[in-house]
Amino acid sequence: MNSPTWNSTGAVSSQARASWELGYARLSTLTLADIARPHLTDLVSQVRESASLAVLDGAEVRYVARVATGQITSARITPGTRLPAYATSMGRVLLADLPRAQWPERIRSLRPQALTPHTLTSPETLTAAFDQAADDGFALVEQELEAGLRSLAVPVRDRSGRAVAALNVAMHAGPESPEHTRDAMLPALRACAARVETDLALASAHIPVETG
């Protein structure tokens, strides 16, 4: 059974599909984390892996919502945790959404360092990774942030099409191949992001939504 979404919990009620009215007049603002959390819960129940939502904050991604399974690697991640954007799947899709003309300066400002033997650090490899993420609409990062950790992320876009956040699932790297993870997880991840985007668009049409 799906968890209640922001719409179904009564924050917004509908008289007709084309006409939405505010359900709880007491709400003056809402956060993207509030909107995403029930969808993350549904995603975790479906894929049986931890899921998170993060925003780009300078050279880092900052986690704003997370639902964990307890099966993740040694990294202890909670809302508020910051990680280097260049070495994370969520950072990759958010950086890839920036205008390409900004990539060289942004890569220099990231000051990438090798966190594991697999971490991409050169301007050439990072530019290629951003290009791939922009073309594919997702990023798969294999043991670049932490040995044994694999993550897959997609962007979450506002009504203008701008990526305001990213959504990921994270798991142990193996024994399945990265390609198996992509094929198994990406449809559910994209569907979850689409539901978050739908609720975000609906909410922001009525009240301010804090995306950070």
Image: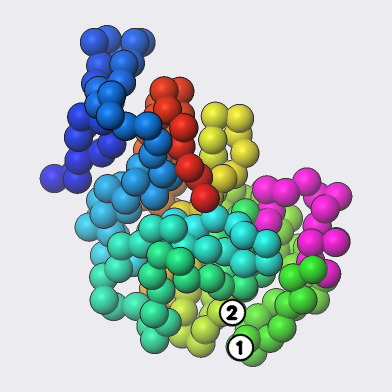
Of all residues, the one furthest to the left in this rendering is 1
Q: Position of residue 30 (x, y in %)?
A: 39, 39
Q: Position of residue 53 (x, y in %)?
A: 44, 56
Q: Please tell me which residue is depicted at 79% across the width and 68% down the height of the picture.
A: 109
Q: Which mark is residue 144?
A: 2
Q: Please tell me which residue is depicted at 32% across the width and 32% down the height of the picture.
A: 27
- In the shown orientation, is residue 121 left or right of residue 203? right
Q: Which mark is residue 116?
A: 1
Using the numbered discs, state the Cα–Cα distance from disc 1 to disc 2 in whole angstroms. Answer: 6 Å
**Do the residues under discs 1 and 2 have CB atoms within 8 angstroms?**
yes
- In the shown orientation, is residue 206 left or right of residue 9? right
Majority secondary structure in the magenta region? helix
The type of residue carrying mark 2 is Glu
Query: Which of the two labelled residues, at mark 1 and mark 2, occupies the earlier sequence position?
Result: 1
Q: Position of residue 59 (x, y in %)?
A: 68, 66
Q: Please tell me which residue is depicted at 25% across the width and 16% down the height of the picture.
A: 14
Query: In which quarter of the view is residue 175 placed?
Result: bottom left
Visible in this render: residue 180? Answer: no
Identify whether 169 is placed above or below 9.
below
Q: Please tell me which residue is depicted at 61% across the width and 50% down the height of the picture.
A: 136
Name the one closer to the observer, 159 or 139: 159
Visible in this render: residue 160? Answer: yes
Quarter in which the N terminus is drawn: top left
- In the shown orientation, is residue 166 left or right of residue 50? right
- Mark 1, Cα crowd under 10 Å, few <14 / some 14-19 / many 20+, is some
Span shown in magenta: 95-108
The type of residue carrying mark 1 is Thr
**How many marks overall?**
2
